[in-house]
Amino acid sequence: MEKQVIQSVGFRNTKDENGNITGFQFKVRLPYYRGIFLSQIRPGTLYIDGEKIEKDDIVWNIKGEDFINEEMRTDFQTHWATTCPAVLKVKKPGGLAQGYHDLKYGFCFTSSYMPPIIQDGLDPDKESMVFMPEFGHHVNERRLLIV
């Protein structure tokens, strides 16, 4: 995996069973030294070329299984390992045009040993009051290419 949270491998348009382009996908890695359970994740808002994509239009795929935000909040059993990138599937009819695209996406997660004052202030769409990218408390940006 690459050092950046947003991975360059796997960035592409997605198609339905009829070959229609229904959106795009990209991968993110967990910037943490150990895995977490899905209920710990706080997904953020995605911006692609400045366009806001709502959280409900993003499906997280962990180990080949799809999860919507609502399911992740209550999933205390599915574990996301640091060695396995998550695939984020984004609904966007027609997908993205060929060429470069700017992605901006933040997510964070809770940890049992973090003080409540820090966890209460977690906002995946803003930088944390304490900069801790190793805990996912960072808004990630990357320019990627679809060919």
Image (cartoon, helix red, strand yellow):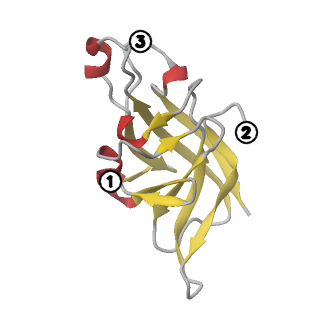
Badge 3 amino acid = Val
Secondary structure at badge 2 equals loop
Secondary structure at badge 1 equals helix
Label 2, label 1: how far apart the Cα atoms are? 27 Å
Label 1, label 3: how far apart the Cα atoms are? 28 Å
Q: Residues within 10 Å of mark 2 (few under 14, many from 20)?
A: some
The residue at 48%/41% (across/down) is 105
| Label 2 vs 1, first from the N-terminus | 2
Return the residue at label 1. Answer: 71
Mark 2 or 1: the one toward you: 1
Return the residue at label 2. Answer: 1
The residue at 35%/47% (across/down) is 75
In this rendered view, identify the residue nearer to me: 114 or 17.
114
Q: Residues within 10 Å of mark 3 (few under 14, many from 20)?
A: few
Return the residue at label 3. Answer: 130
Image quadrant where one finds the C terminus: bottom right
Badge 2 amino acid = Met
**Residue 56 image position (x, y, % from top left):** 33, 57
Label 3, label 2: how far apart the Cα atoms are? 26 Å
